[in-house]
Image (cartoon, rainbow, N blue to C red):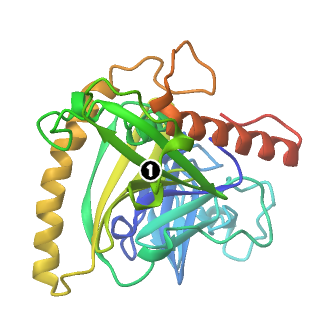
Amino acid sequence: MIKNQWYAVLESKELKRNRLVGVTRLSQKLVFWRDGDGIGCIFDRCCHRGASLGQGALVENHVECPFHGFRYDSKGRVTMIPANGKGAKVPERFKVDSFPAREAYGFIWVWYGDCKDELPEIQFFEELKTGYASGGFSEVWDVHYTRAIENQLDVVHLPFVHKTTIGKGGKTLVNGPVVKWDDNLMTFYVKNEQDHGQIPQRPGEVEDYRKLFHLQLLMPNVWQNVISDRFRIVAVFAPIDEGSTRIYIHIYQNFLKAPLLSRAVSLIGSLGNRIVLHQDRRVVLGQLPIRSELRMDENLIQGDLPIIEYRKKREALKKAATSNQGDGAND
């Protein structure tokens, strides 16, 4: 994982009032709940006897262990040990780790990194922050989240993996692609065409690239397919552990406001996107190794530029986090 980043890890609708949700994310067993007006997120292991806190109950915005009733606040601190009496002081060592958590843009986010009094703002695609209806689906892939992300950065595979869907037309020749960064936001412009023996244009030779079809990646784990000004597809790649990722696909549109019609668009869009995603999954699940690195035993080509740029940015962010904290605990 890249430290000092906000990761989208759940859909907001998965977190109900007065209910604990235990999931594995970021290679940790975690418990989430709605803590008053905020979100609580602590490690799912009682510091007393190791019981799963996710099997407990939510009592007065505190997590109550199902084994002996220890109560935890959103910082992971034990606030009451019933066996010692309500008035007994709880020693500081009675605590578990926690993650700062926030709700924004239809997702639950956790801060993976150094503890700070003031955390940076959660970043999202500016044009989607208001005015769009959304809905979708999710599924788990047995790959590291980097492989799942790179699949959506791959502009070369379309006419082969998706030849019956979005890759129709046999546009096997890849011009560019053109990749531009704005801080942690990567935009890549695609100009694929049929091969008539011409030489692909290099990225600097592609004219009027800003008018081309484009996609975006917002580090560390959110992707957008900019189909039109009024219709977008967003994917969140929530890391479960080293070998699995939950992918959330959301359809965003702003041309139908009526709830029933909006849900119908989301349903139809989800059906189509599920077909396309499963075409990808068949190939990606067979890739080795299951996670990507900056340098691997591969022979990359010009068309792989978005993947190369992603790996470089990921490495740069990992190094920046390491230099700030003085250790190398990034995965």
In which quadrant of the rendered image does the C terminus lie? top right
Task: Give the quadrant of residue 82.
Answer: bottom right
Residue 209 in the image: x percent, y percent?
Answer: 46, 54
> Please, is residue 53 above or below residue 157 in the view?
below
* Secondary structure found at label 1: strand
Residue 273 screen position, x and y as percent: 20, 51
Q: Is 89 rendered above or below residue 319? A: below
Rendering coords of residue 271 (x, y %): 13, 53
Percent across and percent down for residue 12 are 39, 69
Q: Locate residue 3 relative to residue 281 in the image: left or right.
A: right
Going by the image, does 76 lie left or right of 241?
right
Q: Mark 1 sits on what residue?
A: 189
Tell me the residue at 40%/27% (across/down).
Answer: 199
Q: Quadrant of residue 141?
A: top left
- In depth, the one of 1 and 217 nearer the eye is 217
Q: Is residue 158 left or right of residue 153?
A: left
User: Is residue 55 in sight in this rendering?
Assistant: no
Please say whether residue 137 is visible from this viewpoint: yes
Q: Is residue 53 left or right of residue 277?
A: right
What residue sits 63% from the left and 21% below the top? 295
Q: Is residue 5 above or below residue 242?
A: below
> Which quarter shows the N terminus?
top right
Residue drawn at x 42%, y 64% as measured from the top left? 20
Badge 1 crowding class, 10 Å Cα cut-off, few under 14, some 14 to 19, many 20 or more, is many
Residue type for callout 1:
Tyr
